[in-house]
Amino acid sequence: MKIVICGFGSAGYAAAMSVKRAEPKTEIIIIDPKESDLMHPCGLPYALEGIVNPDDLLQNINLERGGITRLQGRVTGILTDSRKVLYKTDSGSLTENYNSLITASGYRAVIPAIPGVDKLLGKSLFTLTDPEDLKNVLTASEGASACVVIGGGAIGIEASFALHKQGKRVIIVEMQDQFLKGIIDPDISLMTENHLSAEGISVQKNCAVTAFEEDGKLHKVICNSGIIESELTIIATGFAPDITIAENSGIGFSKSGITTDSFLRTSAEDVFAAGDCIASWSSIDGKPISSRLATSAYKQGTIAGINALGGRMEYRGTASTFVTKAGNFELAGTGFNTETAIQRGFEPLAGKITSKIRPEYYPDNTDITVKIIFDKNSGLILGAQCCGLEGAASRINLISMAVEFGITIDELCRTELAYCPSISEVYDPLLRAADIGLRRLKR
């Protein structure tokens, strides 16, 4: 049995490891363009901030010692009838045979088609997707004082805070009326925006960039609300699935990604897909949802690896559980926000509370906000959001499990949580929010 894995990010790594654990004697070939085995893109903003050494984001894991062969090259297509994968190297074009194949080609950064972007990209305008981007941003930031970050998603939030910690004047520009539109609710977004503003980062919403203009050392970021002068601008406007392999191979895809079934099989026989390149779906209602998370990719890769061996493991979708952090401020979420719940046909209610994490008498206490969203008719938990200086991620992880397993708001209220004054309240804010929600449900 010979399995070829195209791409070696979270999904590709998980696929290789699951195959190796299940059938150690299986021949595994990885084809990936990176010079190192692994690259950890989620660490890029923290390397920009100076917390992480950029070199530590690249990792070699001695694949050969584990009996796995890695070929450095970029896959361009698959000859599905003859079971051959085509890839390019510095030496030319090559092929590799396979019995089963997993494509884990990942994502590409979305660069808006804004006038002037091509002229400035790589000079004073950058994305933040790989170590080469990071190197260029760090070089450009030397001596720069005025910076702009375009996009109020997780990367935009993290990058803006990282530049701020370098002592730069930072403006974060978002074309929508809130950060993380469609992912968190406006009230939770506002708390995040207020935290960034309190740190000294300028937040401009409803601000669409219409052009870039070069102007000596500076460039102009021209928006519908005015002109911002910048020495360094990071574009953090999201990611799109890399579907090049499917496009070149006659494999089914849409603009959302490569099409798979619940076993992560593509339209081609014995070809599977996993990670940011696939069109994902929600674990709540099974409908399509845009979700590009390393945790989802890892789970998908594990399942694709087992099924490439002939298994029948089913992927049930994603709860889109995430967390981002700016300084000590955590913002986390899972499942649907209120807007998405309504769009999906639910009648959402919410239980929300802002309170201290620990007892009032305990020193160094902090506030946390927990908001749990559930369906008015069934009580089914649909999602949650949480923010504060600590404890947001741990509470969202619990709600993520509730979402995944179809738990209702009254069932959540029966849960007992661990208590210690240095860690939490006896009546944890999570359960208080759930109780408020349950009381609303019973009115």
Image (cartoon, rainbow, N blue to C red):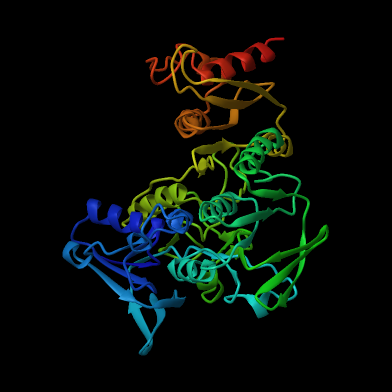
Indicate the quadrant where residue 10 lies.
bottom left
Q: Residue at x 58, y 42 (%)?
A: 286
Numbered-mark total: 0
Task: Give the percent coordinates (x, y) of residue 87.
Answer: 41, 80
From the top left corner, tell me how far across and down residue 251 is, in percent: 53, 68
- Observer-nearest residue: 218 or 174? 218
Rendering quarter of residue 215: bottom right
Q: Quadrant of the C terminus?
A: top right
Residue 82 appearing in the image: no
For the point 68% across and 35% down, which residue is it? Answer: 341
Measured along the vertical axis of the image, is residue 115 above or below residue 203?
below
Q: Left or right: 14 with respect to 153? A: left
Q: In this view, does 382 lie to the left or right of 89?
A: right
Q: For the point 52% across and 17% down, which residue is it?
A: 431
Side of 100 relative to 338 (left or right)? left
Residue furthest bottom as drawn? 91
Q: What residue sits 38% from the left and 48% below the top? A: 312
Q: In which quarter of the image is the N terminus?
A: bottom left
* Above or below: residue 391 compared with residue 89: above
Can you give x and y, in whole percent of width and height, for residue 255 in the image? Answer: 64, 63
* Front in this rendered view, residue 331 or 29: 331
Q: Can residue 357 be seen in this view?
A: yes
x and y percent of residue 99 in the render? 33, 68
Is residue 263 shown left or right of residue 109?
left
Nearer to me, 311 or 290 = 290
